[in-house]
Every structure is written in C-alpha cells, then in structure tokens.
Image (cartoon, rainbow, N blue to C red):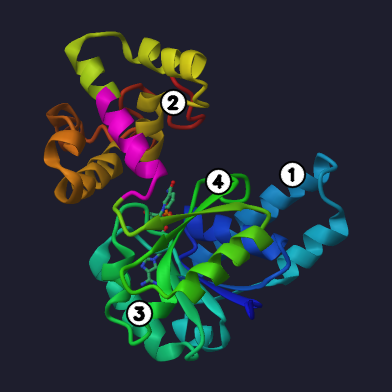
Amino acid sequence: MGIERIGVLGSGLMGSGIAHTVAQAGYQVLLADVDESIVNKAVSGITRRLKSQVEKGKLAIEEQEAILHRINTTTSMEEFASADLVIEAVVEDVVVKRKMFGELDRICKPAALLVSNTSTLSPTEIGAPTKRVGQTAGLHFFNPAPVMKLVEVIRGLGTADETVATLKEFVVSLGKAPVVVYDSPGGIVSRIQIAARNEAVRMFVEGVASAEDIDTAMKLGAGWPMGPLALIDLIGVDLHVTNSDSLAQELGAERFRPHTYMRKMVRAGYFGQKAGRGFYSYDQVSDRKK
Ligand SMILES: NC(=O)c1ccc[n+]([C@@H]2O[C@H](COP(=O)([O-])OP(=O)(O)OC[C@H]3O[C@@H](n4cnc5c(N)ncnc54)[C@H](O)[C@@H]3O)[C@@H](O)[C@H]2O)c1
C-alpha cells in the first residue's frame, strides 16, 4: 500500500479524532492547524481520551505513550512534503478546501494521495485544482472517529481505481469498514440522515408530536442512539441548514430543503447546544437538556 506517514490538515473535532485513530493504528501523524493553541488543544483532547482508555483497562500505559509519540504537530503545511497521504479536515467550505488542495498539490510529493473528510461537498470539485486528480478522493470519517466503524471512500469523477483500492486497504488497516460511494453529496449516511432529520423537523412544526416524543420514538422504535432533533442541536442548527441547502442544490430542493422554522432559529441565534438553545434548552455548563 505504501502508506506510512499521514498528514491531517485541520485539528478541530474531526481532524483530532482522525489523528487519534491513525496514530492508534500505528501510523506516524503530522497534525496541522492555523494556530499552535488549536493543535495543542487537539493533542490535550487526544491525551485525555487515551488516559480514560488506560483507566478503564482498555489500553496499556506504554501504548498510550507510543500513540502520543507518533503524533507531531505543526502550523506549516510545508511540513506535509514527506506525507504519503494527507487527510484534509478543515471547515466545510468548498472555496477553502479547493485552496488547500491546490497548496497541498504544490507541497506534497508526487505519489502522495490527497483526500477530504467533507460531509456534503464534491470531492471532484475539491480535487480539481490539483495536477493529480486521480490521486484525490473523499475519505469520510464519522464522529467520534476513533469509535465509529464506518469510513466512506468517496470517488470523484477522476479518482483512479488504484487510489480507491489503496484507500480501502488503508481503512481496513485502521480496523474500520470501508464502503465506496460515487461522488454524490452527502455520501450514503449523511444523505439519508439529513433527509430524515428534515422530516423530523417538519413533523415537529406540524405539531405531529413534541420534540421529546419524536426523539424518544426514534431512539426506542428505530434504535437510533440519539433522536433527530437532539442530533440537530448537537451538530448545530446553522450547520444542519447549510448542509441541507448544499444537498438541496444538487439533489432536489423538495427533498432536502430545510424547513423555514430552522432559518428563523438561526436568525434568532438558537444554534443548538453551543448556544444553549435549539429544539431544547441547555445548561451551558453541563450541556444537559432541560
Ligand atoms: N463534525 C462532524 O460530525 C463531522 C463528521 C464528518 C465529517 N465532518 C467534516 O469534517 C470537516 C471538519 O469538520 P469539524 O467538525 O472537525 O470542524 P471544526 O470546526 O471542529 O474544525 C475545523 C478546523 O479546521 C481549521 N482550519 C480552518 N482553515 C484552516 C487552514 N487553512 N489550515 C489549517 N487548518 C484550518 C480550523 O482552525 C479548525 O480547527 C468538515 O469538512 C466537516 O464537514 C464533520
């Protein structure tokens, strides 16, 4: 497969989880972000999660140290020059991602693969500014990355068969299961989930049931670990609206258009858990639902 050194660009929620996952699987990782305080925060979070695994007896202390030893950090993308694979996990903005891919193409060695963890954007569009389109793709991890077993390998229009095969092998080496999706916004999981969440909002607004009852129904009746409205609050109402709009534009406005009610919530600043108010009210400190 020839992949040993991994670069992870963006050390937010997903980038830090991906760095943790690949380091735990034995790879050398270089984790980058725009500011040193952000990468340091990411490493502290990874350390905290590993410590908790040690305390629960799930991980040996020596292994915790070895994993942390495999993670290096930087604020300079130039250091990705020796990476075999770069996983981009910066903000969900196609302009930013395309710019990052253009720069990575200039910096990285010719054989390196460049992939994006995008949830809803097109890997074809993100990879287009590079001169190695065949070596670009989407590689969609789920949150929390160290726990979730699925990774979607999203092939762009020009992604080479060899790249897809290498990425599948890489995902298996992480102890996870790959599925291959042809470039389609939202892949498999987000597309189905976003449609279902929007339907839950329509039912809530129509007064079919309360938010609590909709969420309880989907947890106890459909086996979801979390109800759709609580999940929108967790993701952020604003981000859910943006992601729905993105799918609506490509796949059909009727099916994916977010309900006007959520646009009003965004205008009012009811962004969900992070704002203390969404479909539920939250205690800002404990994040508990009221
Ligand atoms: N949050 C989720 O549940 C989830 C799940 C799967 C995929 N994703 C996707 O993963 C990506 C990242 O999402 P996230 O939730 O981790 O976001 P986040 O906001 O937590 O992290 C994004 C990070 O990117 C950094 N960044 C921005 N511009 C940069 C640049 N030029 N160079 C280096 N770093 C830069 C930011 O400083 C931030 O730390 C998005 O494309 C998102 O759609 C998110």
Magenta stretch bounds: 186-199
The numbered mark, 3 or 2, whose residue comes first in the sequence reads 3
Q: Which residue is mark 2?
A: 283
Image height of 241 relative to 182, above or below: above
Q: Quadrant of ligand 1?
A: bottom left
The numbered mark, 4 or 3, whose residue comes first in the sequence reads 3
Q: Position of residue 48 (x, y in %)?
A: 68, 50
Identify the residue at horizontal 61%, vertical 65% (top origin): 169
The numbered mark, 3 or 1, whose residue comes first in the sequence reads 1
Q: Which mark is residue 178?
A: none
Identify the residue at horizontal 16%, vertical 37% (top origin): 257
- In which quadrant will I find the C terminus? top left
The numbered mark, 4 or 2, whose residue comes first in the sequence reads 4
Q: Which residue is mark 1?
A: 52
How many other residues sit within 10 Å of disc 3, few (<14), some (14-19) or many (≥20)? many
Amino acid type at circle 4 is Pro
Identify the residue at horizontal 31%, vertical 23% (top origin): 279
Q: Position of residue 64 (x, y in %)?
A: 79, 58
Disc 1 from disc 2: Cα separation: 25 Å
Q: Are marks 3 and 1 in contact (CB under 8 Å)?
A: no
Q: Which residue is mark 3?
A: 133
Q: Which residue is mark 4?
A: 144
